[in-house]
Amino acid sequence: MSARDPIADLRRIAFLLERANEATYRVRAFRSAATALAALPAAELAQRARTGKLTELSGVGDVTARCVAESLAGEEPVYLRRLLATEGTDLDAAATALRTALKGDCHTHSDWSDGGSPIEEMALAAVELGHEYLVLTDHSPRLKVARGLTADRLRRQLDHVAAVNEALPEGFRILTGIEVDILADGSLDQEEELLARLDVVVGSVHSGLNDERAKMTRRMLTAIANPHLDILGHCTGRMVSSRPAGVKGPGDRAHRPRTRAESDFDADAVFAACAERGVAVEINSRPERQDPPKRLIRRALEAGCDFAINTDAHAPGQLDWQRFGCERAALCGVPAERVINTWDADRLVARTRSAR
Ligand SMILES: [Zn+2]
Ligand SMILES: [Zn+2]
């Protein structure tokens, strides 16, 4: 295969990142690398790529060096290929189409844990939005700050949901679920028998978010291997902005940091495991989370994962936040078929229950 022009590929990537409204530092990394490499004679560029010495140049990092090596080998760089997946599409239209395709929400809270409203009100708001189902995923026992449900309270909630479902309009139902804490050793914070009874299990890391990389990766892989886990919730735990005014929830307390860096884990290993085990990667729509970041959504897509575009709503009005997640999914070229809450409730539950 004949070589491509690596400088042109780097510039193209920078352009596409800008178009996708990615962080400026990321765009700049590709532009600086292009400038640094354009100053080299072609023979030296090829020689450095062959011997792995591109990163000795200032402005050239591992990611940009890998793109150059792929270009010189005549391959379209993987990074570029991911970005091109959305080129030429009307992103607003794609986001709207995704939102329209959603039939439910797989991550919501009621006042049984740290939400602000009763289950009935959450359900009625979901009916108004045109949903066919709402998965109720209140917190698990160890998250005391969020009034996580003990096994007994969860049992009572299941009876209550069954009664509420009787009274709801035909064609709509509340599916049972939990947002279960992924504990330090990767186990899930609820009784096995209960997890088996629930329609949908979302697992999230809420503590030890600064675990070092190998430990966090192990912890997440252990949770993903658990046959009860259906959806990996807000996988990096990052907080990009302060909580919107008046929004109740964990993290609300004054001493909590306003922003939080992403947890460090081996994303390729985690997403490969999700794809293999049929665990969907959540695209969390909360404005202060926007989790995972777009570069990780693209990697999960490439790894073959399915997704769930969830609101993590703690109040009825927040159930309309799915559009934020849809916008980010559209920017990454996530097709509707790969989003499990575009499926109807029967298909969704058939999938979540088959794994158990
Ligand atoms: Zn959570
Ligand atoms: Zn939540």
Image (cartoon, rainbow, N blue to C red):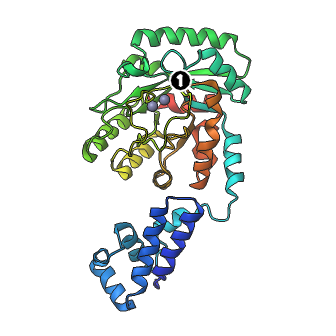
Answer yes or no: disc 1 within 8 Å of ligand 2: yes
Q: How many marks?
A: 1
Front in this rendered view, residue 98 or 8: 8
131 above or below 119? below
Q: On the image, numbered disc 1 is attached to which residue?
A: 109
Residue 204 position by quadrant: top left
Within 10 Å of disc 1 (Cα), the crowding (few <14, some 14-19, many 20+) is many
Figure quadrant of the C terminus: top left
Q: Position of residue 176 (x, y in %)?
A: 54, 20
Residue at 53%, 23% in the rendered image: 109
Report the front residue among 324 and 51. 324
Q: Is residue 62 above or below residue 293?
A: below
Residue 220, by quadrant, is top left
Q: Is residue 233 left or right of residue 214?
A: right
Q: Tell me what residue is drawn at x 70 percent, y 58 percent.
A: 90
Q: Give coordinates of residue 221: x percent, y percent.
A: 33, 40
Residue 144: image location, x then y, percent: 37, 19
Q: Position of residue 202 (x, y in %)?
A: 46, 30
Secondary structure of the residue carrying numbered label 1? loop
Q: Amino acid at mark 1?
A: His
